Amino acid sequence: MKRNVFSSDQRQLSVCLPSLILLLTIWVSHSSAANETVSRGAAVAYACMICHGPDGQSTGAIPSLKAMPAQTLRETMLAYRNGERSGTVMNRLARGLDDADIEAVATYFSTRR
Amino acid sequence: MFTRRSFLQVVSGGLTANILARPALAKARTHVVVVGGGFGGATCAKYLRLFDKTLAVTLVTPEPRFLACPFSNAVVVGLQELNTLSASYDVLHRRYGVRMIHAQATDLDPVAHQVRLSNGTKLTYDRLVLAPGVEFQWNALTGYDEVASKIFPHAWEAGTQTKLLRQQLAAMDDGSLVVITVPDNPYRCPPGPYERASLIAYYLKTHKPRSKVLLLDAKDVFTKHELFRAAWSRLYPNHLEWISGSQGGRVTQVDITTRSVHTEFEEYKPAVANIIPPQRAAAIARSVGLDDGKEWCPIHASSFESTVHRGVHIIGDAAIANPMPKSAFAANVQAKACATAIVSLIGGQAVPPPVLMNTCYSLVAPDYGISITGVYRAVDDAIQTVPGSDGISPLGASDEVRASEAAYARSWYANIMADTFT
């Protein structure tokens, strides 16, 4: 199950009540399995911070992710994953993340100040 | 300390009214004890407090300061100083409220939920995290014990041994032989011996060009071996030789009285011998059957809770977390997954799917870095690599790519140290 209901799917929700109810049911059931303290976006971000620094604030050559707009991070990760963008370790690591994780971590870092 | 467990025990013993009338005791906090102050234990203690400030978290570690193994190979060859590997535990206490005890955990009672320490303290826990790392199997290699390590250093834990190997390399004459011996898997930091051989070859080429490093390996293949061997051919054709296990590289005996290193077919008399001994989980993680007779500790993949004793979690080098390597990155990311699981379990919630990754950089030269990566998920209580996420730096990459990975390696080190200790 993909949890990328945050962007394009949300627009559909506003015009289609049965879909709204169905997708909200799926979303709630997915969320209820997750820890309330540590969101999925935070959990993925904590792994990223090992290279990108605490809260995404990096020291040295590795870029910072802190406060990066969600769209920038999402598009960059998708480009790494599908090979449109060439990196060192990031092509490989991006292939380990699904759409929902990329969306969640992009949203998480965009909110860090 | 009065924990939730002991509080409940007293309550069930018939003192309910008396206890509840005393607000201080009614506020007894859930207590998590973390044993081991490395990348696994320190990270776990910090993130437990980040996730749930109501938890009482005690970190037990013998050393007053942390000394990192990553980049200790750069110290060995004089590229940086030992103090660059050091970190204080003060911030864990001051900023995150982790209680520090500098002692060794010596005994464990998983039924009574108690850990005994070398200073005589007995700690009662609600949950225990063991991150004690590895211990060396003295005499598993004939002739190599703790006394021998003062002559032939292992330098496989940072500190005195790192300095000793550095001093021996600096003191030896040009034209000398350096031998490094490598054990079978598993051991801490799989690419570490090959990075060390690379940087020692760099040192010899630069400072003692008539000298050579000989890598005697129990194995025929090793992590990133295609990348290492291609780099060695190009950078160190006259300064580094690797002998695989099937070519006679397996060391069978060392003798400090004759200063000799023996393989099945040869006897070497190097000026400097760096013996990396066989390893296993540290003693506390093998106590009370936690290793299930395997020398390393089996765990549940989502929570890192022992498959042998409930309430005990094992992370980092001591755990069996294949295909994740025994690396600093893996210990840190496992610590966060473990802390998340513990907070969930204490809150009566389901443990969420863990986020598990690894990236290991190695320096082949100061401006030549290579990497290996993996992303993992828990499937049917086993850790599996997500297809496509594992792999190494490309063979035949440009010098610019190698230089950028060397810079990323240094940046990674700064960032993982900050993530763990600040």
Image (cartoon, rainbow, N blue to C red):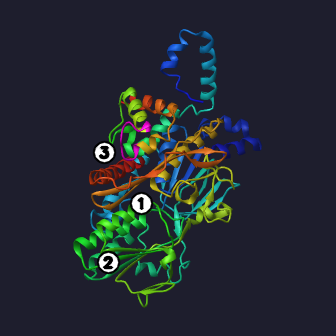
Q: Locate residue B352 relative to residue B326 in the image: left or right.
A: right
Find residue B77 and report its horizontal and vertical position in percent: 30, 68
Looking at the rendered structure, which numbered label has been put on residue A59?
3
Spatial distance from mark 1 to mark 3, Cα to Cα?
A: 26 Å
- Compare residues B222 and B352 and report the one nearer the observer: B222
Question: Mark 3 falls within which chain?
Answer: A
Residue beneath the point at 71% across and 55% down: B111
The amino acid marked with disc number 2 is Lys
Q: Locate residue B69 relative to residue B388 in the image: left or right.
A: left
Residue beneath the point at 75% across and 42% down: B12
Is residue B95 visible to us here?
no
Residue beneath the point at 44% across and 45% down: A92
The range drawn in magenta is A81-90
Looking at the rendered structure, which numbered label has been put on residue B64?
1
- Compare residues B186 and B210 and report the one nearer the observer: B210
Tell me if mark 2 has few (under 14), some (14-19) or many (20+) residues whose alpha carbon lies within 10 angstroms of its own. Answer: many
Looking at the rendered structure, which numbered label has been put on residue B212?
2
Disc 2 + disc 1, Cβ < 8 Å: no
Spatial distance from mark 3 to mark 2, Cα to Cα?
A: 36 Å
Vertical comparison of B109 with B304: above or below: below
Q: What element carries label 2?
A: strand
Check if residue B157 falls in the magenta segment. no
Q: Is the magenta stretch mostly helix, strand or loop?
A: loop
Tell me if mark 3 has few (under 14), some (14-19) or many (20+) residues whose alpha carbon lies within 10 angstroms of its own. Answer: some
The amino acid marked with disc number 3 is Thr
- Compare residues B422 and B361 and report the one nearer the observer: B361
Check if residue A83 falls in the magenta segment. yes
Question: Mark 2 falls within which chain?
Answer: B
Disc 3 + disc 2, Cβ < 8 Å: no
Which circle, 2 or 1, is nearer the viewer?
2
Vertical comparison of B97 with B37: above or below: above
Spatial distance from mark 2 to mark 1, Cα to Cα?
A: 37 Å
